[in-house]
Image (tube, grey):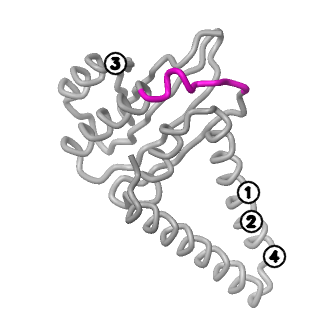
Amino acid sequence: MINENQLVEVFRATRHDWLNQLQLIKANLALNRLDRIDEIIHQIVEEAQQESNLSNLKAGQLTAFLLLHKSLNNDYPLKIEVEPLTLDLSKEDEAITQSLETLITTIKTLIPSIPILISIYKDDHEVCLSLQLSLGEPLDIGALQQTAASLTMPFDVFQDEEAIYFTMNLHTL
């Protein structure tokens, strides 16, 4: 899982991000740009809320993987959006995490440097995990479809002009 060096690197990256945010607030305060300070604080609170929602899913491996990836992979910036859900994913945690890790590793080998949006949300009678890769142009997704379908927890894949979408059913309600 996570080793001591990775943990220290996560703390370093988190501290660096916090200091950047504080410097932005301080600079905007000096310029009396209170509206911009409000925006920065809103972004900080929103990101903390998303991470809290993720932590509340009782999926320790998934949470650790996503937060580690978010802190350490600048070539693949990760945004996390998680609806506030009362759900225990502890039984599926390892399979979800392994499948997601395999899919992201495949993405990294096929697509250089792309932002990734990960969403966990309730949809009708199920809870889903979705990845969205925003593209500048259509891409041959055959290898990604093959990988996504072969995972322990498989993803459905589709593409439009703007993005590739991967969706996994996490839990049926």
Figure quadrant of residue 167:
top left
Front one among 44 and 94? 94
170 within the magenta span: no
Mark 2 or 4, which is nearer the eye? 2
Whole-percent x and y of residue 12? Answer: 49, 72
Which x, y percent locates residue 98? 36, 31
Looking at the picture, which amino acid does disc 3 mark? Thr
**Looking at numbered disc 4 in the image, what kind of residue is underneath it?**
Leu
Gap between marks 2 and 4 measured at Cα: 11 Å
Residue at 32 percent of width and 39 percent of height: 104
Q: CA distance from mark 4 to mark 1?
A: 16 Å
Q: What secondary structure prevails in the magenta region?
A: loop
Mark 4 lies on a secondary structure that is helix
Dot 1, crowdedness within 10 Å: few (<14), some or many (≥20)?
few
Q: CA–CA distance between discs 1 and 3?
A: 35 Å
* Circle 3: element type: loop
Question: Mark 4 touching mark 1, by CB under 8 A?
Answer: no
Query: Which residue was labeled with disc 3?
Result: 152
